[in-house]
Image: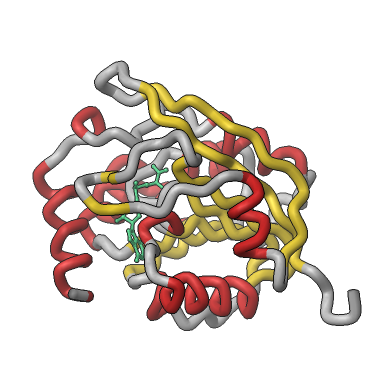
């Protein structure tokens, strides 16, 4: 099952262009808006979970962020992103891993995940993800999933849709909600997908 998951994503990135997959954004504006709201220093440690070949890393580099990590299960996705960035890719830390197997060696000021968490459909996987995130995050988390009005599948795989309340309840053991919005994402094929974007702050041990 695990190998199937990786094989699925390797195939997607080897056979489909950015214009052929639904999640592509020319500018990841909502993610950037949420990130700007934190007013992070340029040396803040930022990780993009399931970053794929998203351009978020390009924009963060352009803004002067110096400590960016992109993690993805697909090596092919990261090769695409590195190719696009050319020499600038050397300034980024690239990690090929299933998020469930990730053993962070660092702590991150910001954990960003657009459309990866929602592929975890079993309670055990969700708990594993949140335990890893909780251990690795210093401050903030941004999670974006399909909303309760979003599609039931993404890239042909089943996803878990979330309302604001459901996501808040899923995370409330360790994270406090800051803000949520719904966004209609316009796909490269001119259809829309309803996303939920939420930011959270990690609760400190004594709070
Ligand atoms: C729908 S795409 C979103 C890509 C990117 N975040 C964006 O917004 O453009 C989902 C991404 O998550 C990655 N992915 C899926 N399951 C994963 C897992 N268990 N661990 C790490 N990455 C995963 C896929 O390879 C893919 O790049």
Please provide percent x and percent y for residue 69: 50, 61
Residue 24 lies, with reference to residue 127, above or below; the image says: above
- Point out the residue furthest to the top here: 190
In the picture, measured across the screen, residue 57 lies left or right of residue 154, that is right
- Quadrant containing the C terminus in the rendered view: bottom right
Please provide percent x and percent y for residue 92: 47, 58
Q: Which residue is drawn at 54% across and 44% down?
A: 61
Residue 202 lies, with reference to residue 65, above or below; the image says: below
Please provide percent x and percent y for residue 98: 34, 71
**Front-lying residue, 128 or 15:** 128
In the picture, measured across the screen, residue 62 lies left or right of residue 18, that is right
Q: Residue at x 68, y 40 (%)?
A: 180
Asked whether residue 125 appears in the rendered view, the answer is yes
In the picture, measured across the screen, residue 37 lies left or right of residue 142, that is right
Q: Quadrant of ligand 1?
A: bottom left
- Quadrant containing the N terminus in the rendered view: bottom left
Residue 89 lies, with reference to residue 191, above or below; the image says: below
**Front-lying residue, 3 or 81:** 3
């Amino acid at each position: 099952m695990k190998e199937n998951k990786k094989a699925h994503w390797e195939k997607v990135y080897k056979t489909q262009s950015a214009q052929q997959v639904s999640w592509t954004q020319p500018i990841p504006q909502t993610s950037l808006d949420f990130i700007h709201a934190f007013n992070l220093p340029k040396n803040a440690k930022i990780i993009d979970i399931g970053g794929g070949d998203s351009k978020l890393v390009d924009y963060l580099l352009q803004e002067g962020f110096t400590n960016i990590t992109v993690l993805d299960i697909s090596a092919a996705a990261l090769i695409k992103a590195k190719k696009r960035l050319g020499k600038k890719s050397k300034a980024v830390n690239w990690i090929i891993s299933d998020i469930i197997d990730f053993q962070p060696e660092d702590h991150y000021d910001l954990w960003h995940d657009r459309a990866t968490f929602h592929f975890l459909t079993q309670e055990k996987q969700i708990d594993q993800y949140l335990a890893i995130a909780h251990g690795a995050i210093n401050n903030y988390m941004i999670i974006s999933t399909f909303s309760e009005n979003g599609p039931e599948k993404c890239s042909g795989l089943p996803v878990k849709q979330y309302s604001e309340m459901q996501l808040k309840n899923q995370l409330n053991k360790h994270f406090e909600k800051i803000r949520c919005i719904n966004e209609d994402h316009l796909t490269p094929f001119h259809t829309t997908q309803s996303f939920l974007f939420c930011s959270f702050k990690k609760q400190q041990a004594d709070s």
